Image (spheres, coloured by chain):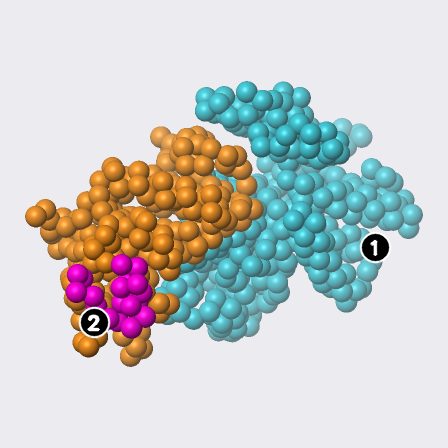
Chain colours: A orange, B cyan
Amino acid sequence: MTTPLVEMRDISIAFGGIKAVDHASIDLYPGEVVGLLGHNGAGKSTLIKILSGAYRRDQGEIYVDGKQVEIYNPRDAKALGIETIYQTLALADNVDAAANLYLGRELMTAYGTLDDVAMEAECRKVMGRLNPNFRRFKEPVKALSGGQRQSVAIARAIHFNARILIMDEPTAALGPAETAQVGELIKQLKAEGIGIFLISHDLHDVTDLADRVTVMKNGEIVGSAKVNEVTQDEILGMIIAGKCPPNATPGPGAVNL
Amino acid sequence: MTDTATGGTGAASRNRDSALTRFLRATEIDSRILGMIGALVAIWVGFDIYSGMLRPSDGLFGGTFLTARNIWTLLVQTSSIAVMATGMVLVIVMRHIDLSVGSILAFVAVVIGSLQVFWLPQLGLPIGHPLIWVIALVCALALGGSIGAIHGALIAYAGIPAFIVTLGGLIFWRGASWAVIRGETVAPMDKTFKLIGGGISGTTPGSIGATASWGIAFLICAGIVAGLLYGRKQRRKFEFPLRPVWAETFLAVTGCVLVLGATYVINRYYWPTGVVNRWAEQNNVTVPEEGLDISFGYALPVLIALGVGIVMTFLATKTRFGRYIYATGGNPEAAELAGINTKRLTVWVFALMGTLAGISACISAARLDAASNALGLFDELYTIAAAVIGGTSLAGGLGTIYGAILGALVMQSLQSGMTLLNFESAYKDMVVGGVLVFAVWLDQMYRRRLK
């Protein structure tokens, strides 16, 4: 058995007495897509934001490549190759696509000034691959359509040699064609050996793309299962009732019936 | 490779656009800036014609406004607010506000005033020592910067809203400046320090004379041309669409004509006869019958404001610091998630604002040749107004340095113009307040139409 790319062990975080994540453990292997499912408020986004450095956990350990790591802020996570596409996209609306692509990692000239021209040139290349119809490089991203904004956010996550990609509701704002495009992209990234956490409401999305699913409820892990070993009804049962089917590994949140 | 600025628009839509739209697109001039320049020209011409009707003089349209002397004075009067407005833009872009700059200005002014008049002479530096103005200036920058940094730290790390921290600062530092000098007025300032204000000290002018002014003008022209050429080279290197050659030429010629024209006008303002005679006596020069024309040239405070404007524009557009300020203003959460330390950035922005208030303190105290705790009263409001008239959005994320400087110039033009026309100060305030609201309304209308 190979070492997991990421392992989060016994993670807890509370906001003012409410346990948003309660002793959750989750892992991810290279080239694997793990779907993270659950109702609104089940703690999926919170758990994942601990990994991406947006929140600091109260308890638990994080391992990358089997080595324990400390993630205090988004910079630490990025240094470990963990990139995130947030549900809100987290774009600076008032600057253009290139500035967003390189936000926090700007290309500089020899004189220590921003190399806007080089950044725009690179941005044109990346966007050309991701979304060939994208032309509005000079405009602030506020002026772009939902799909275009999404492709900027995706470009930013994959452009810097990410090894671990977190996608929080990546298709929520997209039409059917664009959703299919994101699906293709996930398959391609997976083939490159990148591990992906896919957070979604859409059960079909997850069963189509993920290798495993992990279900959360009330901040706890209900259980994990290989997608091809459980039925969609069984997954729904995990999400709604916290009922762990026989083929799944139960977590602390599983209801004993 | 296409020959137009934006590759995205098709030929069909291009034909539908008006000549002005096509012109703006080819030259890539911000149409709002064009509007502001238009407003400025209208104000200047209007005042000149109106003042000419009341009292004919040698202005461009027969009035007193567009005379070399008035333009020179106008620029000097604008410089203090213009310097601070460049910093206020960045503060507002970051979704903060700084209400304390006028009080910081007063506090810094009374401290450096006391420094050069009381404290340094006691320490053995005689009055008039050439080091005095250097020490005063350095202290002003350090003191202003530290006060700003304290404000910034309270905002960023203690989580107190900028409005509250700087409102407290507005009251606190005004009180502190009274406490330093017990309400007295420190005057006069040191002879060399006084030059920072642009006035004449004895027979030494606080301005650089005709030759140096032309030198600076040609340097700026060379800079404009070099910048355009470099931009074109970069675009070609990365195969971006180029501006049409006529648009580049137009920008270069317009820029140079404006710079040289302004210099010509400034150089037409001459020393008063009394000073010329005194100077001639000291230097054993005989003044000819028809008088001797010695140009003031650009005044030091104007050059300081110009320098600050260039440095701040560079900071805002060419450095990480500036990029992060705009990104944070556009979406603070996104900036944080991109790994930007927004708290430290906040401290730096307020420290920068304080430093600029320190510079303005030197300009104001030197110009007035005195430091009192009433200096810079209401300057925070004029500074914010200049930034807002210049197109800075209070919602954050939007605003330019040159816009704020133009905004300061528009406001000062209104005030000077009304002074020339002998408006009572009550009515002047009413007009300036009205213009502020009107300008923001106009800007909003414009932005809505863009959508």
Q: Amino acid at mark 2?
A: Ala
- Dividing the picture into quadrants, the one containing residue A9 is bottom left
Q: Position of residue B334 (x, y in %)?
A: 41, 54
Q: Which residues are magenta?
A: A231-248
Q: Is residue B408 visible?
A: no
From this view, report whether residue B61 is shown above or below residue B441.
Answer: above
* Residue A254, numbered label: 2
Q: State if disc 2 and disc 1 touch (CB < 8 Å).
A: no
Q: Farthest residue in the left direction?
A: A1
Determine whether, in the image, residue B209 is placed left or right of residue A159.
right
From this view, report whether residue A13 is shown above or below residue A130.
Answer: below
Q: Which residue is mark 1?
A: B421
| Neighbours of disc 1 within 10 Å: few (<14), some (14-19), many (20+) | some
Q: Farthest residue in the bottom direction?
A: A17
| Neighbours of disc 2 within 10 Å: few (<14), some (14-19), many (20+) | many
Q: Secondary structure at mark 2?
A: loop
Give the residue at x 62% y 55%.
Answer: B388
